[in-house]
Image (cartoon, grey):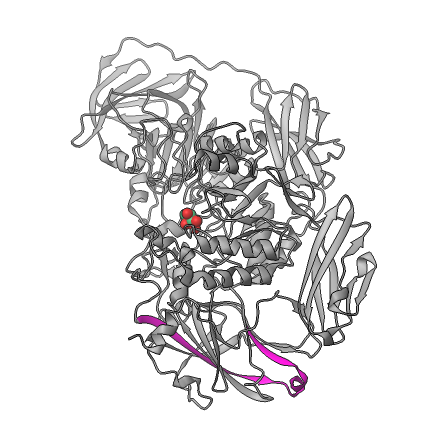
Amino acid sequence: MPSALSAYVSDPTPWHGALRPARSWLHSDAPSRSLNGSWRFRLSPTAAVAAEFSAEDFDDRGWDSIPVPAHWVLEGDGAHGRPAYTNIQFPFPIDPPHVPDENPTGDYRRHFDVPAEWSDAERVVLRFDGVESLFRVWVNGVEIGTASGSRLAHEFDVTAAVRPGDNVVAVRVHQWSAASYLEDQDQWWLPGIFRDVTLLARPAGGIEDVWLRTGYDGGRGRVETEVTAGAAAFPVTLRIPELGVERVWETAADVAPVDVPEVAPWSAEQPRLYDVTVSSAAESIALRIGFRTVEIRGDRFLVNGRRVVFHGMNRHEAHPERGRVFDEAHARADLARMKRFNVNAIRTSHYPPHPRLLDLADELGFWVVLECDLETHGFDKVGWAGNPTDDPAWRAACLDRIERTVERDKNHPGVVMWSLGNEAGTGANLAAMSAWVHARDPERPVHYEGDHTGDYTDVYSRMYSTVPETEQIGTDGSTAPLLGCTPAQGARQRTRPFLLCEYAHAMGNGPGALDQYEELVHRHPRLHGGFVWEWRDHGILATAPDGTPYHAYGGDFGEVVHDGNFVMDGMVLSDDVPTPGLYEFKAVVQPVRFAFDGDQLDITNLRHSADTSDLRFCWRVEFDGVPVEAGELDTPPLAAGESGRVPLPAIAVAADAETWLTVEAVLATDTAWAPAGHQVATAQLDRSVRRPVPPVRPRSGWRPGEGTLTLGIAEFTGGSLTRLAGRAVTGPRLELFRAPTDNDEGTADRLEGSDASAEGISSAELWRRDGLDRLVARRIGVEHATDALRTVDRVSAADSALSVTVESVWSIEDGELELRVEIEPARGWPTVWPRIGVHFGLPDGAAPVDGADWFGTGPLESYPDSLRAARTSRFSATVNDLSVDYARPQETGHRSRFRRLTLTSGGTGALRIDALPDTRGRRPGFTLARHTPQQLARAAHPFELPESTTSHLFVDAAQHGLGSRACGPDVWPEFALRPEARTIRLRITAGD
Ligand code: GAL
């Protein structure tokens, strides 16, 4: 027999009491009081504690205090339990709708004051904007009601329970409830009252709700108004002062559309908002509207008649100290950062964000796909048996969620699509949710990725489809099968707009291939872009045993089941630092495209609707990375979609240096998200004259030799390098290993059409199996010739017959020291290699190497399938700044195609290394780091890396691409590194 208590905790529809209907989150001048602040708090390990604390006279002096809003597991230094991270797994037995008796339960209490004037109010309402996961409310000892739906708003009528002066509110929050089965998103489980609590005086004659639906057509605007109010609220007046609109409606039935002859449209690029008030005698509501019409025409998704391409991010609410608690300044800075990185869209994965976020998105300009708080992914494990989205017992819960989602945020011009949720299988309740949205808001399309066959949604959406598959989706007449579809269903899906609700899994170092996806958008107009998974890492600030702060992930809090660092898959690190992947994204999706054609430059405006009058076009010339000339291009504004051709300046070309012309589109004036001068788009043209590469000089007269030798600045013992220009140096030693990236460790999609990666086995696993991380060498020979030394090594791993022969030739050429390394794999290596390079150790000494100055690509790391943000110039950085602090240490820091590298010590040149191209014109990349790949691979967090003062220099003839196999396709064959013979040729001199 279930007790009353367990029945309530495991009730899929636990709304009882004085819950008010869902409505918009409005800015009203009616009186309100924030109940945020310090509350009394007690945590119990189970839900089965007596609710005596709800009594008015309960003595809570022995309790803790806790801030509201907050998650209790992030308050009190571990005294209130700890966060837990799972992706798909339920952290409790799959026993729906029940949850364990061990159910952390937080009791909250506080006093609040009701002003005497509020006695005029028709109603007093208590609003909770977010409580995870189930809660029950009392006011002055009177039970008010219960509700669940963690990221949704709930309002209770407390009129009968409150009185002027002092009152007490008590709230009981259960971490687990039936609702937890609907909230299985890939994120931290963070219980508590984590959004605002507000007491509202609802005036007699007030306006309960208002919906301003706008339209835009060729300069004309329309506002359709829906007012929810009693008869006493009328007349109601709508005012748009800037447009001279004032409309008075005597009754609800009078409310008619308002046509405005001349308005500026709203778009993510030009987020033009107009202030509006909707007022009765008793209450005035302030809104900001934007004029825009959303429509689907054929397979196009249009706003204001023009196709939208989403260059989007999946955005979770994540803050390293506050979790999902909204911090407006932080959120605004984050959105401004998105704008600076050419992000134009947000999917609010996987729940409605704090309502203010949508005000900010309207204001700064983002296309928003607003997602409902619904995910039941854990049912996948049981073949979706009992999935709530297909069980009548959960239908009301599903409908309640979508209703609260749409009602709360319906006024935002930025919201251009509703999403029913994420990874919740498929079922009748989802179809019912969709039908509800269609009836309520016929304009905005319904999205849900799990509806593979398109039975109840309006757009075709997928996650992580590969490049060829995505291309097939966009190709007219293609009959390639689509996931889960019969040919007929597939044909229907191809008649709809397509978007990738998730792609380019940005976990750790990566993703690769962003440019390949972007290319498709320009070739197949059915493809409307997508949303990178995901915007930021969700690390939680924690302290290592030695006191070092770090960003914790799954398992760091002793969880019973967890999914490790799968929660660290953002384009921005937990501490707000943009990753190189985000710079790559910015470069790939830049809204202005440049194409060089002889002395002409073609400029294309790829924007949705804005012209280029907000941009200035600049150019500059560099000789070997040193700026020599700069100017501005005279470019008339280009309308959206238009191309123009301008002459390039006549520039000088250096005879003995590389000449690079860089063009840039920069903001002409300050915006809300970046200052004037901010670079929006750029491109480079190599104008260098070809210079001959000195051929390898054949040498003869080799004779076996041992012992000590000096060649120019190099000193050797037993054939091995010991010093360069007087400083201790070891190497070159063959290095084929890189500390596996999260994508290298992934087992998602294997390498397309290739035998180089194996089903279900990660590349990293194969590398470890082949012993790439533990190579040993056997010297086969040391020989001398005049001004030259040659060593041959055979390199292989324990218990492996696979080997690589490495021939190193040191010689004096043109008065300089040259090193040529020939790397030759024996036959039989079965897989891809992470890198083909050599390692030099630069131990600490009198003037330790602690930085680099280089002419090559930069400023950030780059890899073969992530090269678009890399430009050719001259850069410098300290050794520490050359590596990215990924949450789990992994390969980082590779700078592709360097020409000249100066290793520096305290800013002064110590050794200069010039890289000569190989016979196919390929140049090596370099990595300068404090740790070896083997050290990095052993550490699970940055604080676990050993203290190091040694610098390690890696010169790589080649690196494997990045891909996004942590949750998506492996490295594209063109960028996969197969074992092959490579040559590295370096000239080394002392100093600068
Ligand atoms: C998707 C899911 C996201 C996230 C991602 C992997 O399947 O929708 O929430 O889990 O995979 O990081």
* Front-most of residues 471 and 907: 471
Left or right: 734, with 129 as reference point: left
The percent coordinates of residue 852 (x first, y second) are 46, 37
Magenta stretch encompasses residue 386: no
Which residue is found at the position 35% from the left and 34% from the top? 750
Does 156 appear above or below 239? below
How many numbered marks does the figure carry?
0
- In the image, the segment drawn in magenta is 102-128
For the N terminus, the image quarter is: bottom left
Residue found at the very far left of the displayed protein: 799
Residue 290 can be seen, yes or no: no
Q: Quadrant of residue 560?
A: bottom left
Q: Is residue 266 left or right of residue 83?
A: right
Most foreground residue, 964 or 79: 964
Q: Position of residue 140 (x, y in %)?
A: 50, 87
Residue name at image x 52 percent, y 75 percent: 37
The spot of residue 131 in percent (x, y) is: 47, 69
Left or right: 315, with 730 as reference point:
right
Question: Can the viewer see residue 452 in this picture?
Answer: yes
Residue under the point 58% across and 45% down: 343
Q: Position of residue 712 (x, y in %)?
A: 36, 22
Main SS, magenta residues: strand
